[in-house]
Image: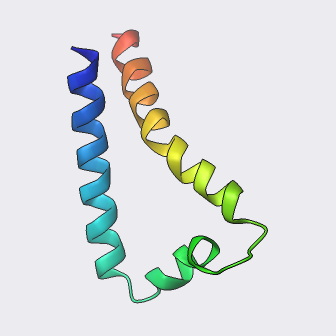
Amino acid sequence: MSGIIVGAAAASIAAAATVILAALPDAQALLSPLTEGSNEYAIATASVLASLPMLAIMSVLAISGRE
């Protein structure tokens, strides 16, 4: 059950990120730490972006646990 929730959350976050990046004209500037070569912030940026889906899932579980 939790695998389905994680998969659905990851798919929805990926879809929302795609729409947002396509809609924003400065989307390339947002991703420049990842796309530029030899950038010292690339690992930190990738780790923060990778942790966002888990933070979203944890937020949903925390909110549902209060009720």
Residue 41: x and y in percent read 74, 65
**Residue closest to the eye, 39 or 8:** 39
User: Is residue 45 placed above or below 54 in the rendered structure?
Assistant: below
**Drawn side of residue 14 relative to residue 30, left or right:** left
Q: Position of residue 14 (x, y in %)?
A: 30, 54
Instruction: Check the image and name the residue furthest to the bottom.
Output: 25
The answer to which quarter of the image holds residue 20 is bottom left
Percent position of residue 32, x then y = 59, 79
Image label count: 0
Taking 37 as reference, is 18 left or right? left
The single residue placed furthest to the right in the displayed view is 40
Q: Residue at x 31, y 50 (%)?
A: 13
What residue is rendered at 54% in x and 76% in y?
Answer: 30
Q: Is residue 42 left or right of residue 21?
A: right
Along the line of sight, the residue nearer the viewer: 56 or 40: 40
- Please tell me which residue is depicted at 37% across the width and 27% down the height of the picture: 60
Kindly give the residue lying farthest to the front in the view shown.
Answer: 38
